[in-house]
Structures are given as C-alpha cells and as structure tokens.
Image: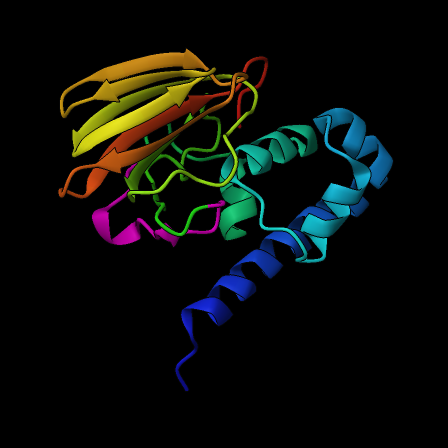
C-alpha cells in the first residue's frame, strides 16, 4: 500500500509530537514548565504534542534545547551514543531528508552532523522553494549560512538581503528570519546552527 504525501507528513509530525510529550513526562515536566522554558504558550505546545499545529524548525530547536536533547532526536527518534568516536562520518546514503515539515512545503532538510554525540552545532543542507514560510523562524543561538545554488532572498529583522551562490552570512537567530529562492534554479544552502550555553541543540 502506498501512502499519500499528506499521510506521511501526518505520521512524521505525530511521531515528533509523541517524542516531545514522552520526553517531557519522563523528565517530570509539566506543559506549564516547558512553556516557561521555551516562552511558548502552553496551549501552543499542547497543540504540537497532539498534532493540531505544524511546528517550524525554529520552534523544535527551542523545545529540544529546553528538553536537553538533540534537535535530531525530535526529528528522527535516534539517540546518539555517548561513547562515540571523536569523528563521525555521515555517508550520502545516511542523510535522511525531511520534506516540508517546518511551515513550508518547499523546504527539504538533510542532516549532516546528527551522528556526533557531543557536537556543539547542527548542520543541514536545505533545499528552499520559491515561497516564504507562513511565519519567520526565531530561536536561540546563531547560524551560518552558505549559498550552494540559486539566488536567495533573505529576510532578517525587517531587512531584505539577496545572496548568490558562494555568499555566506552569519547572524543571531533570536531575530525573525526566513528566506526563499528567486529565479528558475532550485535553491540549496548549507546551514549550521549553534545554541548558546549548550553542547547540543
């Protein structure tokens, strides 16, 4: 039996919500405590846990930070081995992409660093469509972005920047930001995220 893209997306989001709820309860953390830690409304977090809201990756990053887990765990359910080697290698065949689960159906995320247990950052190759997400991203830490393909229209804290292949930019992630691809060529960027005060996102 083949499942539709919408059915697969619902399953993907349901698994994320279940992981958040299970982690929260395992830590003895109420929704109110998680709301205080993330600065999200308790009702909004409840809707994420019960699949009534589709969270952007910036929201998941803040939730992961508050729950003291890797962002990649919320996305994949895979825990890293604390005794892992100092080097981790992610083969091309091991990059499991996530299509459109973070507020824009045109975004595809491919994790690059998820196998490193004690990493200080998370890295992704992101394919970006022609539309802005419905809401800007806003989360802890900093980001570095390198444009691989396509022209990017990047909005940051109310200002617009156009980035060409080979351009890079670094910014504080606690200001509203998002981007889209302009032109005919599919946009692709390398994104590295680091959360302040934590060894993991």
Q: Write the residue at 25% across / 36% down.
A: 181
Position of residue 90 in the picture relative to residue 36 (left or right): left
In-image side of 35 versus 145 (left or right): right
Answer above or below: position of 183 versus 38.
Answer: below
Q: Residue at x 52, y 60 (%)?
A: 12
Whether residue 79 is visible, yes or no, is no
- Can the viewer see residue 165 in this picture? yes
Q: Is residue 65 magenta?
A: no
Which x, y percent locates residue 100? 41, 51
Query: What is the total number of numbered labels drawn onto the structure image?
Result: 0
For the record, the magenta segment spans: 88-103
- What percent of the width, then of the height, locates residue 38? 71, 28
Q: Dominant secondary structure of the magenta stretch?
A: loop
Instruction: Measuring from the top left, give residue 169's x and y in whole percent.
Output: 29, 14
Q: Is residue 90 magenta?
A: yes
Q: Residue at x 25, y 29 (%)?
A: 152
Image vertical order of residue 121 relative to residue 41, above or below:
above
């Amino acid at each position: 039996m083949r499942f539709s893209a919408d059915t697969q997306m619902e399953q993907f989001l349901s698994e994320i919500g279940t992981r958040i709820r299970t982690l929260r309860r395992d830590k003895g953390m109420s929704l109110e405590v998680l709301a205080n830690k993330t600065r999200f409304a308790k009702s909004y977090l409840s809707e994420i846990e019960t699949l009534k809201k589709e969270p952007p990756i910036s929201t998941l990053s803040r939730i992961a930070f508050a729950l003291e887990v890797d962002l990649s765990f919320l996305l994949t359910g895979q825990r890293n081995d604390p005794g892992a080697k100092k080097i981790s290698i992610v083969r091309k065949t091991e990059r499991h992409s996530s299509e459109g689960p973070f507020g824009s159906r045109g975004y595809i995320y491919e994790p690059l660093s998820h196998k490193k247990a004690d990493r200080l950052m998370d890295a992704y190759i992101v394919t970006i469509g022609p539309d802005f997400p419905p809401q800007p991203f806003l989360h802890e830490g900093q980001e570095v972005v390198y444009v691989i393909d396509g022209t990017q229209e990047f909005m940051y804290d109310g200002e617009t920047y156009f980035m060409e292949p080979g351009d890079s930019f670094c910014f504080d992630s606690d200001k509203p930001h998002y981007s889209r691809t302009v032109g005919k060529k599919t946009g692709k960027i390398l994104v590295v995220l680091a959360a302040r005060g934590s060894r993991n996102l």
